[in-house]
Image (tube, grey):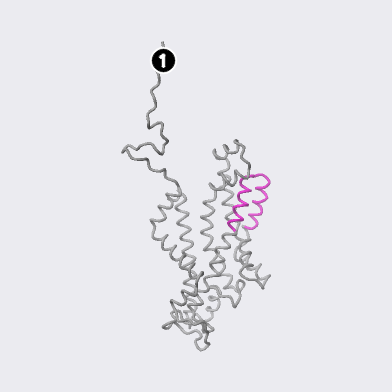
Amino acid sequence: MTSPRPPAPTEDLLLPPAAAATPEGGPQAAPASLGRDAWRQLRSRPLVWACLAVIALIALTAAVPGVFTALLSDDNGRCELSHSKLGPTAGHPFGYDLQGCDYLAQVVRGSRPSLLTGIAVTAGALLVSVVLGLLAGFYGGWVDNLLSRATEVFFGLPFVLGATVILVAFPRHGLGAMTLVLVVLGWSTMTRVMRSQVIAVRDADYVRAARMSGARPARLMFRHVLPNAITPVIVVAMLNVGNVISGEATLDFLGVGLQYPAVSWGLQLNTAQSYFLDHPHLLAFPALFLSATVLSCILLGDAVRDAYDPKLR
């Protein structure tokens, strides 16, 4: 007596999940992902678009300051001491600075060093953090102990105070030297975040499967661990841009950052502090640009962090 033959599989069971039909008869929608869900949440928030608009505007002024100067003022590139500290007038909406130069042109030109420093320091610190955090979290043992102790030493150094001490010791420095100092002092927080993410990912099932199939450590780190651990670090880096811009302006204001004849918002605030009561425009305009830039970077970073962290929704 023969056993009954099992029923033949239906057409739907032979199709891959993406091609199976929905109850309505149409194709099944693509599965939701964290990145797609985060982008949907971000683009629905007006605050995100406002922050992006401010950052894009500041980036354009840093890239092509002459275009904005020509459109918004009658600056001819000449400075007249007879116009020193005069307030806003027709053709010169920001007035004049201490040397009698068009203040709008000076404020626009001051955006470049601040923005360059914020981006360069964050990129450099992010690179250092990814490498060190990946090594410490993946290998563990003495490698983790050594790198963790070094991270704790630098984490205990105050950012602005440490940079002030170093830059005072080397008074003849420029934008490159200051960027390097800020990178040296600014990588520890992102390294700790990267290390914790790698530790959480390194024992995942897909990493174990790749290890059992003979994948080398370098392939495991850069193909399987890094792509799944770097998102929180990038979010922290976005928040860090605003902090670096604020720190660079603070160093310039204290007189240990960029030096004249360089132009930056921090230097303009340093000059304006002595004339604020009689000529408030000297302090108001660079402070407004600096505050708008830093606030936009921080709010955008906060929004991205909230969108990519399901616990905060």
In the rendered image of this protein, does residue 138 appear above or below residue 183? Answer: above
Quadrant that contains the N terminus: top left
Write down the region rendered in magenta: 125-154
Q: Give the quarter of the image for residue 159.
A: bottom right
Residue depicted at 43% across the width and 64% down the height: 53
User: Does residue 151 belong to the magenta stretch?
Assistant: yes
Residue 21 x/y as whole percent = 35, 37
Label 1 amino acid? Ser
Q: Is residue 240 left or right of residue 44?
A: right
Q: Is residue 143 left or right of residue 38?
A: right
Depth check, front residue: 70 or 82: 70
Residue depicted at 57% across the width and 51% down the height: 194
User: Does residue 152 belong to the magenta stretch?
Assistant: yes
Residue 273 x/y as whole percent = 53, 78
Residue 127 x/y as whole percent = 60, 56
In the rendered image of this protein, does residue 82 appear above or below residue 230? Answer: below
Residue depicted at 58% across the width and 42% down the height: 202
User: In terms of secondary structure, where does tag 1 sit?
Assistant: loop
Residue 144 x/y as whole percent = 65, 47
Instruction: State the residue position of label 1.
Output: 3
